[in-house]
Image: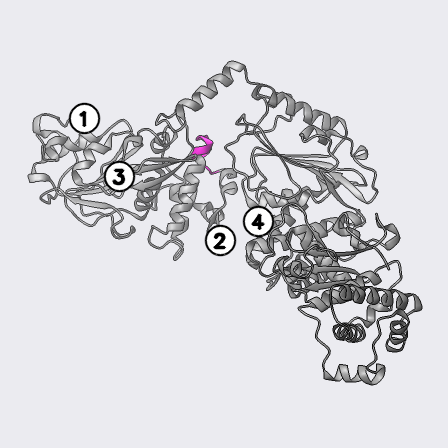
Amino acid sequence: MLKHVVPGKLNDFFLPLSNRPEKGVYFCRIAGYTPAIEEFIKQYYDCARRTGVIIDGRIPNPDTNNLSYFSEMMGAEFRLDLPFLQAKLQKWLPRMSDGARDTVVSAIFSTLQDMLRHGKNENMLRNAYIKYMCWLYYKFERIVNQLGGESLPKILYDGSISNYELQLLVVLSRAGCDIVLLERAGDSPYLQLDPRSEYASLYQEPGMTPFPQQFDLKWVQSELAKQANRQRLYGAPPAVRNCTNAWMKKPEIKEILTDPKARGTDPGLFYNGFILQRGVEDKLLFSNDIFSFYKQLKSQQRRVCLLSGGIPAPTPEEISSIRRQNYTNMDQLAAGLVPNIQYPANPDLQRCMVKAFIDLLYEESKASGGMISRLTNKAVYLLVWLRRYQKELFSNWKMPETAVWILFGKCATANEALFARFLARLPVDVLVLLPDLNENCPLQDPSLLELRFEASLPMERFPAEPSQMRVSTAAYQAERELDTLMYQDSGLYRNQQYGSAETVTLQTMYEEIELLWDQELKYRPSFAVTGQTVTVPVLLEKICGVKDGQMNPYWASIKKLITPDTTVIRSVPWLSSLDPNPIKPFATQFLKNGRLQKAAIKNHKAYPYGILRPEMQEHLLDKLQLLLDQRTIAGTYQNGTEYTVIATALNLNKDLLRQIQKFDFTKKNPKLIIINTTEKILSLEDSILVAYLNLVGFDILFFVPTGYQCIEKYLPAGYVNEHTLGDYVYDLSVPDFHSVQESGRGSIRRLFGRS
């Protein structure tokens, strides 16, 4: 009989007998879950399916027919001695080899003797003998003929084992079978039968948890079927695979400078690195250190692909070049998209790409709940970026070379993180460097080495050339740190501290307008700063009528509101469809599938906002997209009005642009006063201007002494807060406000009923 030994690790189960650290059989029970255990169970299940026995639940007891046949063939005699058992087993299982029979007989005899020593009577021994013989014939006949070889048969038992079953498994273990008991309900039922764990050893490893609810042998079988199907998608397996980070001597990015040939000696492995560094170790030295690191990579003749500020999004042309169809499941999706991966210069590298692509898609399928449309979008991004960068990374590649892919400054999207994970499965050293700790990054992966330093250093671009280096002095860094302390969550703000804003229109009482009009935004209700985005509270009011019909106080009150940041429109319509507009002929090129083509707009010769601050350009384009998405203007996405919206919003006059250029989201905002004393109404272009400037952050007041519905044609009902001041007055002419006198109750206070 073979000796029962404890495996050093689970994979020892798959070693031939002579190659095991200690010659013997393994009989283990597993009562907890880890991902590694899941993979082992899958592999062991597949092995038991091919060369062993799988027991899901209980071994069926011999039925009446089984017992009758046994009695007819073997008779009712029973003796506890080796010659008797030898003769009976030879007759019962004649195809068993002599060596295997001797082993099984010795194991049965030893087990029955154990039962005798534990006080079992002869009748109980007879019943056990009959049950063993029937089970060997009907359940285990296929493996008893394999006993005695180098490859040990495998038995996988899933369930709460009974006493007789345990005794038989002990027989088979002693005879030369490896056995795994899968205890999904815990170890307590087994310990009731074997309190001292004499027969089966309990396998344990760090991090074990209870088995997931769905984990059973049927689930394992379905997962293996999926893996087999995935293997068909892979085609021929790659000859090499990745060894990521395990070769490093120290956890630092300088390890990437190690010559790939010196990282390891296994010809079936390529040795690469996958590192995410957040923050910097030393603010003063980081720029110089990272430039020196880059120079050393180039001096080693390594292929280096460097991206600063994130990965540029796929262009429409790149996306359209990916061949794809509509898919209903993951297998169709993977099979349909894999042909887009082509690298004929090195078929084995192409196989690595295919395997990495398919593996990641199936991982993402689990994480996203299997939404095929979303997975298709992710897959297209991967394929576009692979095509874009594969020549730079893999030109004339051969083992054991590894290129270097550096993403600097931003890795903000899930697609960027997914592409970094994809490259990390190929012969590429992947470095994601985020010196600014305020940058969010969704990158996570089991093989990722994450380095974190406490110092934060905002840097927009990697210093790949000496002219790009910005080396800070200690005094400058001290000033920046003081600046952070002063302006972080303190209610104090630097000039132009924030580049992103969302507007909220205040619903005010009439009497509040004067108080809020010339007030800094940070003092207004609903002002807030969340992360790097400011919530800007703005006014959008229509004032109808004239208090007591008194015109001098009325005009004086309007003059009071005309600040240096105020644009006054004295009559409507102000804009017309006949006005020159250099953007209008090209507006149809700037919108596709409801999305502004920002890159096309910025690169167009007619684009007028290139002189503005970059963050303000982004702000203006974001608000234009929002205006289109909200469909505020009547006719948007119905009769081509969306193109008029684009043309109007991208053709603001010089005075408005100057107000916008100096607009600081935490200070006073630009103003727009529109006075309409006639029966005319706002044009479509006027309405677009009002809605757009409201989103940009302007305060807007309409003075309509007639009370007419002059602004409602193209704007939604209730879009503008309306107040009725007094009597309606008609046929007025707007005066020259320089000549309007402000005195006594002719001031704005009189307009608002104050003295």
Identify the image quadrant of residue 101.
bottom right
> Mark 2 = which residue?
593
Badge 4 marks a residue whose secondary structure is helix
Residue 608 seen? no
Measuring from the top left, give residue 616's x and y in whole percent: 42, 33
Q: Amino acid at mark 4?
A: Pro
Residue 700 seen? yes
Mark 1 → mark 2, Cα distance in angstroms: 49 Å
Residues shaded magenta: 606-616
Crowd around label 4: few <14 · some 14–19 · many ≥20 (10 Å): few
The front one of 130 and 260 is 130
Report the disc number at residue 539. Answer: 3
> Mark 4 or mark 3, which is nearer to you?
3
> Mark 4 = which residue?
316
**Mark 4 or mark 3: whose residue is earlier in sequence:** 4
**Please, which colouring scheme is shown?**
one colour
The front one of 18 and 713 is 18
Q: Amino acid at mark 3?
A: Leu
**Mark 1 or mark 2: whose residue is earlier in sequence:** 2
Q: Residue furthest right?
A: 98
